[in-house]
Image (tube, rainbow, N blue to C red):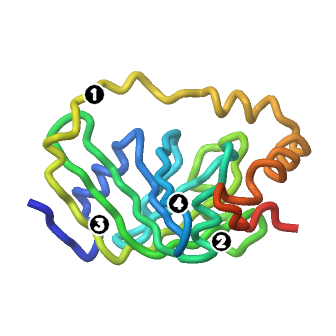
Amino acid sequence: MAKQLPAISDHLRAFIEAQPLFFVGTAAPDGRVNVSPKGLDSLRVLGPTQVVWLNVTGSGNETAAHLLQTPRMTLMFCAFQGPPLILRLYGQAQMLQPGDDGWDTLLALFPALPGTRQLFVLEVDLVQTSCGMAVPLMTIEGQREDLNRWAERQTPEDLTAYRERKNTLSIDGFPTGLPRR
């Protein structure tokens, strides 16, 4: 029942844009595989083979560390309401930080999110759909605001210090490229 496609169709774009949650998967050549859930209003489809997602300050930074070694990334979306569907976007990704070419243009696509840390641009080389019939039906109550509230209480200096303590190395000890000096 799985279908492989070369690009994101208009139908799949609408599906992606309606999802309140997606998952990011990355891995370095060695060490742990990372799968992270992402919410908030943090993903945009830029075209049939390109998406960008905004990442905010969190307790780790595995995605950045993995991409510095191996730029592959998978995004997964699941239909928790409506007809069953699982959608995966496979490709090569790059991290952008404040000051990088394209940062301002891409950041303008998103609402202001406190604690904004980096953007990831995924060049999609394969789109795969599968049935999703085993994914439970769930009701979404809304987005959690805990992380936004935490980030709003931080000064820019607090966020920098936190990133230096928590975001410079992956759990396997790989550098993340943050903070840029």
Quadrant where the C terminus sits is: bottom right
Label 3 is placed on what type of residue?
Ile
Q: Quadrant of residue 101?
A: bottom right
Residue 112, how many percent across, how many down?
66, 43
Give, as a three-letter code, the residue at label 2.
Gly
Mark 2 lies on a secondary structure that is loop
**Which badge, 4 or 1, comes first in the chain's sequence?**
4
The answer to whether 153 is drawn above or below residue 36 in the figure is: above
User: In the rendered view, does 127 fall on the left or right side of 106?
Assistant: left
Whole-percent x, y for residue 121 in the image:
53, 68
Q: Amino acid at mark 4?
A: Arg
Q: CA distance from mark 1 to mark 2?
A: 37 Å
Horizontal and vertical percent position of residue 7: 28, 72
Q: What is the C-alpha distance between the residues marked 4 and 1?
A: 29 Å
In contact (CB < 8 Å): disc 3 and disc 4: no
Q: Is residue 60 left or right of residue 52?
A: right
Q: Residues within 10 Å of mark 2 (few under 14, many from 20)?
A: few
Name the foreground residue: 29 vs 110. Answer: 29
What residue does disc 3 label?
Answer: 8
**Residue placed at 45% from the left, 59% from the top?**
25
Q: Which residue is mark 4?
A: 32
> Separation of disc 2 and disc 4 at Cα?
30 Å
- Of the image marks 3 and 4, the number of the one nearer the N terminus: 3
Write down the residue under mark 2: 102
Identify which residue is drawn at 74% across, 53% down: 167
Q: Marks 1 and 3: which is nearer the front? A: 1
